[in-house]
Amino acid sequence: MAFELKGRRVWIAGHRGMVGAALLRRLQREPVTLLAADRAALDLRRQADVETWVEKNKPEAIIIAAAKVGGIKANDAYPVDFLYDNLAIQTNILRAAAEQGVARVMVLGSSCVYPKLAEQPIKEETLLTAPLEPTNQWYALAKIAAMKLAESYRRQHGRDFVSVVPTNLYGPGDNFDLEQGHVISALMRKIHEAKQAGRDAVEIWGTGNPKREFVFVDDAADGLVFLLQNYAGEDPINLAGGEEVSIRELAGLLAEIINYQGRFEYLTDRPDGMPRKLLDSQRISKMGWVPSTSLRDGLMATYRWFAQTRL
Ligand code: GDP
């Protein structure tokens, strides 16, 4: 069931975040009317405000890119923010969309929704078959709830709400805070600063052995727009097909790109999180979509953005 974007009013909830900003860039190339609400104008955690906004602005499609996000340490340190804020944001938008008859809504999950020890590559049907990884369970639970809420609206009220599970994303607009950010932005900044200060070692959390798959955010935005137009199933669909590397390999690649000659020190008392998180991308690739940016090219583009924007 193809969804024609032409002439539609599309709301990107969370357009200031890394994914939302990439979606804006991507959708500016389509013949749509883009809607966005700044945080000062609309607090997505307040249900009545969200309902009023949706009623007034009449989106016909919504992508929920708004979320409280963060890396392994932030997840563990702020469980209420990750669970409550995300539950509220998603529930409010889905309910308002259902009430106003929004034609299509896309919920974004996360690869951490799958069990800690899931069989790799992780297929969509693995959802809820075994326990979660404890370090990001708060975020994962909120995302699972949103995916199930979308499914339940589809079942009970025939709403065209779909769930997409993107793999780990990175790129321009990422959060480069060392405590809050994910591994790529954090390591990029640490290595860059070590090089500038002439320090000969950079600290890496954990053993360096966990493996992660990464997709560049502009590829992800392209995939989301592809799915918005072409996917209307009850089951979630993985947005993946990126490159898988160990954290150790990632650090090496970043050192090469940044031209850093120093060493890495592994803080093995810090958690590794999920040992491996490679999503099965067969469903989306059979539909005809694969990411196009190599990890090296994506990291170089991200580093250029970081160096220009942050310094
Ligand atoms: P995750 O994919 O949900 O585990 O989130 P992260 O991107 O935060 O972490 C991925 C992996 O990188 C974990 O094994 C972390 O322990 C490891 N890692 C190593 N150094 C860092 C760092 O400086 N920041 C972050 N966020 N993770 C790091």
Image (tube, rainbow, N blue to C red):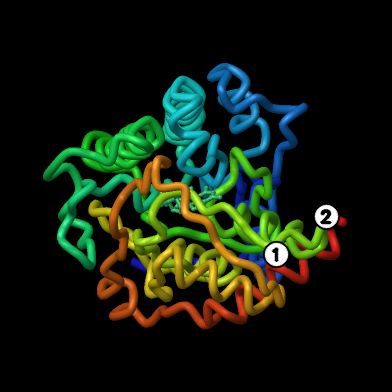
Of 270 and 45, nearer the camera is 270
Decide: is 148 above or below 25.
above
User: Pointer 2: what residue?
Assistant: 310
Decide: is 39 above or below 294.
above
Left or right, 231 with reference to 190: left
Helix or strand or loop: what does disc 1 sit on?
helix
Residue type, mark 2 in image: Arg
Closer mark to the observer between disc 1 and disc 2: 2
Q: Which mark is residue 25?
A: 1
> Label 1 CB, ligand 1: below 8 Å?
no
Pointer 1 or 2: first along the chain: 1
Of 25 and 95, nearer the camera is 25
Asked if residue 160 shows in the view, the reply is: no
The x and y percentages for residue 98 are 42, 34
Left or right, 254 with reference to 163: right
> Label 2 CB, ligand 1: below 8 Å?
no
Residue at the spot 35% in from the left edge and 63% down from the top edge: 211
Decide: is 294 above or below 182.
below
